[in-house]
């Protein structure tokens, strides 16, 4: 499960950011996860409590995930479409030849904190 290692890296970055900015408690961590990234969001939710345990800055924090749609541009007919919904095939011409425009992302979108505890 490579979700654990990338989640740990995101948590490490959030923790370091909190320390550098004298933030006592992170309220939530928001991640953007692309449909085509290979990551399965349910595992991030499952392992978040484990990755954040024994890290007081995350006590009571919440993990939020924004799913980014896998979008592509057909190289044959220039139609834009949702790769997952269309199972990788252009709905207009049926071609599988495409340029991926989005959906491979994995990034920290936001680190929320309790302003009363800064």
Image (spheres, rainbow, N blue to C red):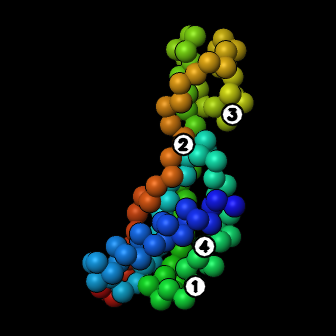
Circle nearer the N terminus (1, 2): 1
The residue wearing badge 2 is 104
Look at 41% across and 77% down and name the residue there. Answer: 15
Label 2 and label 3: CA atoms lie apart by: 15 Å
Which marked residue is nearer to the observer: mark 3 or mark 1? 1
Circle nearer the N terminus (4, 3): 4
Look at 57% across and 18% down and name the residue there. Answer: 74
Label 3 and label 1: CA atoms lie apart by: 36 Å
Q: Could you tell me if residue 42 is visible in this image? A: no
| Residue 61, percent from left and from top | 51, 79
Look at 55% across and 79% down and name the residue there. Answer: 52
Circle nearer the N terminus (3, 1): 1
Q: Are marks 1 and 4 in contact (CB under 8 Å)?
A: no
In the image, 107 versus 12, the foreground residue is: 12
For the residue carrying disc 3, how many other residues have a C-alpha within 10 Å: few (<14), some (14-19), or many (20+)?
A: few
Residue 9 placement, left or right of 23: right
Look at 55% across and 15% down and name the residue there. Answer: 75
Label 1 and label 2: CA atoms lie apart by: 28 Å
| Residue 115, percent from left and from top | 32, 81
Quadrant for residue 116, please give it: bottom left
Q: Quadrant of the N terminus?
A: bottom right
Q: Are marks 4 and 3 in contact (CB under 8 Å)?
A: no
Q: Quadrant of the C terminus?
A: bottom left
Which element carries disc 2, helix, strand or loop?
A: loop
Label 4 and label 2: CA atoms lie apart by: 21 Å
The residue wearing badge 1 is 53
The residue wearing badge 4 is 48
């Amino acid at each position: 499960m490579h979700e654990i290692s990338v989640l740990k890296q995101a948590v490490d970055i959030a923790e370091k950011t909190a320390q550098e900015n004298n933030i006592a408690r992170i309220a939530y961590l928001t991640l953007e996860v692309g449909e085509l990234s290979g990551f399965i969001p349910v595992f991030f939710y499952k392992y978040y409590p484990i990755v954040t345990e024994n890290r007081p800055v995350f006590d009571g924090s919440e993990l939020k995930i924004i799913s980014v749609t896998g979008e592509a541009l057909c190289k044959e007919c220039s139609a834009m479409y949702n790769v997952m919904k269309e199972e990788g095939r252009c709905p207009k011409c049926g071609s599988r030849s495409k340029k991926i425009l989005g959906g491979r992302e994995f990034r920290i979108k936001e680190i929320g904190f309790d302003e009363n505890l800064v």
